[in-house]
Image (cartoon, rainbow, N blue to C red):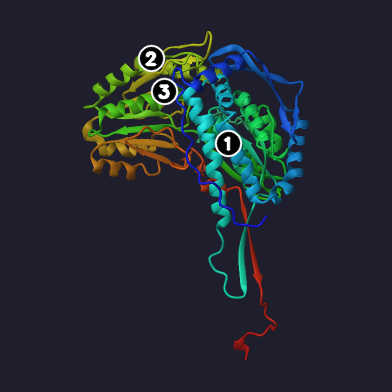
Amino acid sequence: MDGTFTPPAPSNEPVSGYAPGSAERRRIVDVLGQMESEVWELPNWIGGQQVTTSNAVDVTMPCDHQHVIGRAHFAGSDQVNAAIDNSLAVREEWAALPWSERAGVFLKAAALLAGPFRERMNASTMLGQGKTVHQAEIDASCELIDFFRFNVQYAAEIYGEQPPVSPPGLWNRLDHRGLEGFVFSITPFNFTSICANLPASAALMGNVSVWKPSRTQAHSAQVCMELFEAAGLPPGVINLVHGAGADVGDIALTHRDLAGVHFTGSTGTFQHIWKTVGANIADYRTYPRLVGETGGKDFIVAHPSADVPTLAVAIARGSFEYQGQKCSASSRVYVPRSLWPEVRDRVVAMVEEMKLGDVRDFSTFVAAVIDERAFDKHARYLDIAKETANVVVGGGCDKSTGWFVEPTVVEVSSPDHVMLKDELFGPIVTVYVYDDTEWEALLPIVDITSPYALTGAIFATDRRAIHQATLALRNAAGNFYINDKPTGAVVGQQPFGGGRASGTNDKAGSKLNLYRWVSAHTIKENFNPPTGWRYPYLG
Ligand code: NAD
């Protein structure tokens, strides 16, 4: 087929409301009822085969941790090597397919997810990752559909980028090749959309990917693989292997054909990955591209001119939606003394109204945290808060049925309190109240308090204060918000990612990310090559 094809213009997928009585509410209640009664086998996917092993590990619901919904079949070294070998075997054929055919797979995936896969993907994300129906909808359906559709648009733009000059007699071209080898995609528990997008975005650009999901996202990873298969992705382009991070990582990260790592997860894990690649740098066929989106300690800073009602809502939503387990969740807040009593009272009133409970109860706003390790970490920090600070609201936790941690607001009296520095990744927000006269001195403190630089927000009505904060905190966040909560980046609108200890800032959901998965191949063709070797100055 010949033609310079223009993909369908992308737009953001509308968010379904799941209001009582709605058709989508009826559908998802049915799907949830069926799904919770099943125990899925969660195999590895290698070359289109679903491969089980003798090492199957229970996958349980965060809200009901004795309730098993799946058994993830952890791969041994044989399966990990088989996945890599199979990826490499299909690479050339996939890379040789016209880009519009590759794009067609992901546009089809978007259409299927907007249609028949939607409730299945959302329900799996609700049960397996502890998301309310709204949080599952905006992540597992809307954001993933947006990734698929916008990435196709960005790919088309990249392929259209060609050298601006071809003088008479010459033709200069850029061939945006996929990477020579496989891309190892390592994904976290907290966003189904990110998990599917990491291998998919690399695959769109002509790469093959070996995908290692988190055990706590294994259930919805199975739905993602079913979606890719239903969309016509050829076997082996994305191979999935389950397993403990180090077991899979030790093999894949040291493989000669590792061409890239597409990672989202904690800072510590990414630093380990980087060190491993560094230690083996002489052994690879090509320098592996390292893309990592990692931890955060995201801030909201309020100026004395801030509008209190909107600030209070931003703190409540930004800190407690999905139990504070969004990498963008606000977890440290700076409020001037003059505003604090009203801000505090409003936030406390909202938190007291938020229902903590199971995601299958549609009146729940805050559900369980992901697993026991997270629960124990939060419990430890709640103890620190009780010993060293003032717990304004919340402070309790209970792991008898699910991993439940109350939405908690802690007030500390020192700007270098540990709770303003460490990433907790739970429903705990720490507030430092500053003197109104200290505004200018506060900004550099916010800048250096934590090693991270993912998201941040300024609340002010005074335009000079907005300008001051935007400049002073320019490197303190990759995504900066003015009078809005620091969560909820939308593909196509706010490309997402952070710097410093928060990652390589390669901006998921933008063209910038896709550039990392291509290696340009410059082609110069001469229609009139010279016939003599002498230059004019030689006479
Ligand atoms: P994690 O680092 O514990 O795990 C992430 C993945 O890395 C998992 O699949 C895990 O099995 C794997 N892994 C662990 N050790 C490995 C090794 N040695 N080799 C290869 N893989 C290995 O992170 P998590 O708890 O799943 O996710 C939460 C973290 O992710 C938080 O720190 C959060 O801030 C971050 N996050 C960041 C963004 C962002 O865009 N910046 C987005 C989502 C989550």
Report x, y in % for residue 391. Answer: 35, 16
Point out the image quarter for the C terminus: bottom right
Report x, y in % for residue 378. Answer: 47, 19
Viewer-closest of 233 and 21: 21
- Numbered tag placed on residue 394 in the rendering: 2
| Earlier residue among tags 2 and 3 | 3
Viewer-closest of 33 and 496: 33
Seen in the image, is 381 located left or right of residue 439? right
User: Which residue is labeled 1 in the image?
Assistant: 111
Measured in 3D between alpha carbons, the distance from the residue under mark 2 to the one under mark 3, in whole angstroms, is 12 Å
Residue furthest to the bottom in view is 539
Closer to viewer: mark 1 or mark 3: 1
User: Taking 266 as reference, is 260 above or below it?
Assistant: below
- SS state under label 1: helix
Closer to viewer: mark 2 or mark 3: 3
User: Which residue is labeled 3 in the image?
Assistant: 320
Viewer-closest of 19 and 441: 19
- SS state under label 2: loop
**Disc 3 marks which amino acid?**
Phe
Measured in 3D between alpha carbons, the distance from the residue under mark 2 to the one under mark 1, in whole angstroms, is 42 Å
Point out the image quarter for the N terminus: bottom right
Q: Residues within 10 Å of mark 1 (few under 14, many from 20)?
A: some
**Quadrant holding ligand 1?**
top right
Report x, y in % for residue 81. Answer: 76, 36
